Image (cartoon, coloured by chain):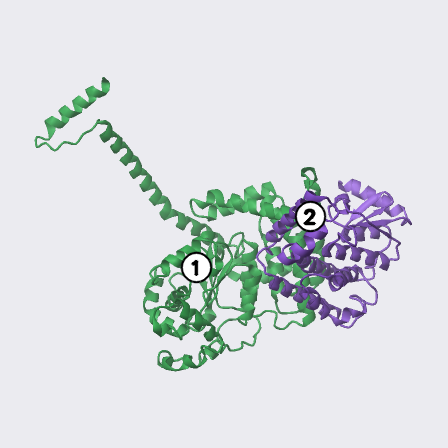
Amino acid sequence: MSLVAEAFVSQIAAAEPWPENATLYQQLKGEQILLSDNAASLAVQAFLQMCNLPIKVVCRANAEYMSPSGKVPFIHVGNQVVSELGPIVQFVKAKGHSLSDGLDEVQKAEMKAYMELVNNMLLTAELYLQWCDEATVGEITHARYGSPYPWPLNHILAYQKQWEIKRKMKAIGWGKKTLDQVLEDVDQCCQALSQRLGTQPYFFNKQPTELDALVFGHLYTILTTQLTNDELSEKVLFLSEDGKW
Amino acid sequence: MLLGGPPRRSPRSGTSPKGPQSSTGHVHFGKSPQTWPRRTRPRSPGLAAPSGVRGSTQPKRRDFPRRAWLTALSRYGARLWMGRRPSLPEARGPAPRSAAASRASRSLASPETSPSPLPATTRGAVAGGGSVQGRAGAQKEVFPGQGAGKMAAPMELFCWSGGWGLPSVDLDSLAVLTYARFTGAPLKVHKISNPWRSPSGTLPALRTSHGEVISVPHKIITHLRKEKYNADYDLSARQGADTLAFMSLLEEKLLPVLVHTFWIDTKNYVEVTRKWYAEAMPFPLNFFLPGRMQRQYMERLQLLSGEHRPEDEEELEKELYREARECLTLLSQRLGTQKFFFGDAPASLDAFVFSYLALLLQAKLPNGKLQAHLRGLHNLCAYCTHILSLYFPWDGAEVPPPRHTPAGPETEEEPYGRRNQILSVLAGLAAMVGYALLSGIVSIQRATPARAPSTRALGMAEEDEEE
């Protein structure tokens, strides 16, 4: 969309209030969804709940393909479809609900930076664990990813996705990392988050922000998902402050 | 780690006066903006010992660290060093049985396999050369704090050479260099423009004192930190967390745009980036290497930003630039009016931010939308110029680098140029003479009456030809 169209659309978006039938689409919860997608979806749900906006969660097997950017989750509000946490936050802001209005400039900068940290490290580590660690891939990921599809297709799609993720890992320099190095990075990231949180209930002031939603989504999923390698959840468990969530 | 402990002192105490005090010797070098407590490193020579064991044939080297090597090799180190080009591959040539291995490791991009005898000769060469600076100029710098260069085995950093008023034109090299300056690490910096000359095949590359080669910038900085050159020493845990967060921000938001601006945007690429690289690289490489680098960057950018259809490319670009502008504004807000991001002393985050910003500011880009935005953020501009003037005084000033960097590639190209000319003339002559001889226009005969038969032969040959 060009800038003009974007402005137009956001105007329209701002004009309408949040409808009652807003839906969030994700993959099938029981059999199909993977760790990283589950984390993202939970983050969005947490964010919308923090804003007190009602949302209904609908599970579809082809959610990934329905999404405009190829990533889950995406929300369908009125006649618009928005995917991924970043754009959703902006969309919600255009409608007049925002969690980070009370922050000053420096805090906003920090919030953005920490969100990028989580995306950069935690999300990438999750992707690595799911798609590049042979044990996990064989036992869990392939089976789950291809579960809604009939026989040759499930393998083909799973391999295709794995190849794509591996290419991306190589491009950002994670291709040569071993599992231990990845876990070390996760450790560092968790320590950084823990330091920033300190003893406060939320990251900034007394109000939750989108950063809290994002971190919650990732941590909760990591802690509650069964994987072949439980080291990831062990690392995360060390953050005792987050037990309150 | 205790390996090197006891034997270190025993038989070698006579060879150099700094024997038992080699650890305290470490304290003296390195200038840093603030005095970092330089902790002595009693254990690190022990780390060098096993590497000595691996590669060395001479038994006396086995238990020892650098001192023995240095004293043994400083004799011919000085000879090697004088009048040589600062690029170490030649200096290392005569090293016993490491030449082939070193060349092999250099030509392949395998950073971990550089053999350990290499550092011996390197250090020996440096010991001789540290005090006798054969050619200290834009291409090689030995940090003054290094003294005689005998204390720590100096680490060597290979990075892209400078241009556009900056000490280095490559993002990663600049970040590593800046960090090294902040901490005063005694690095021998080799500014080269031929990535194939670096020990790992890519730049920047750090050759540590144990001979290991590291080429990932973050790992280089981690290594420097391990060697106690830590710019983040004074940061609180929370500031350390902030560092991680802001570095992720830079990588996600600013890096794609920087890559796009310099390598993908056609006008910029052709007029600035490719021009610089083609001029800087030696003869055969400048034809294909910039193009290859561009393809690599393009692929990386595509993978990072996900799949996009061709008609969305403009959208994607706009999106990228918008996020980058936002990121710059955020950085500016975070910096506020401070001198550095965390108070008055520079930290590793400053090194990275500086490298991104300096490249954007200094390069004269024809298509500089982001540059224009950055120039509007005055505190960031002041921050850049402050760091440039403080830590890179001779590179930051416009006058010396233009004189050196054009002279650099020119002097490098000159001998090749002349040699190529002579060779091509000789080749042409040889071709002509060979053709003449083979086709019989001219024939050489061993007859004593020199004139007549040869002219007759010539005449006959000509008749043959006409027929």
Percent across and percent down for residue A237 are 73, 69
Residue B137's label in the rendered image is 1
* Residue shown at the point (62%, 44%) measured from the top left: B367
Residue B448's place in the image compared with A93, above or below, is above
Mark toward the start of the polypeptide (2 vs 1): 1
Quarter of the image where the C terminus of chain B is located: top left
Label 2 to label 1: alpha-carbon separation: 40 Å
Chain letter of disc 2?
B
Percent across and percent down for residue A123 are 70, 57
Q: Is residue B233 left or right of residue B461?
A: right
* Residue shown at the point (68%, 71%) measured from the top left: B237
Q: Which chain does the green colour mark?
A: B
Chain letter of disc 1?
B
Callout 1 amino acid? Gly
Q: Which chain does the purple colour mark?
A: A
Q: Secondary structure at mark 1?
A: loop
Viewer can see residue B277: yes
Q: Secondary structure at mark 2?
A: helix
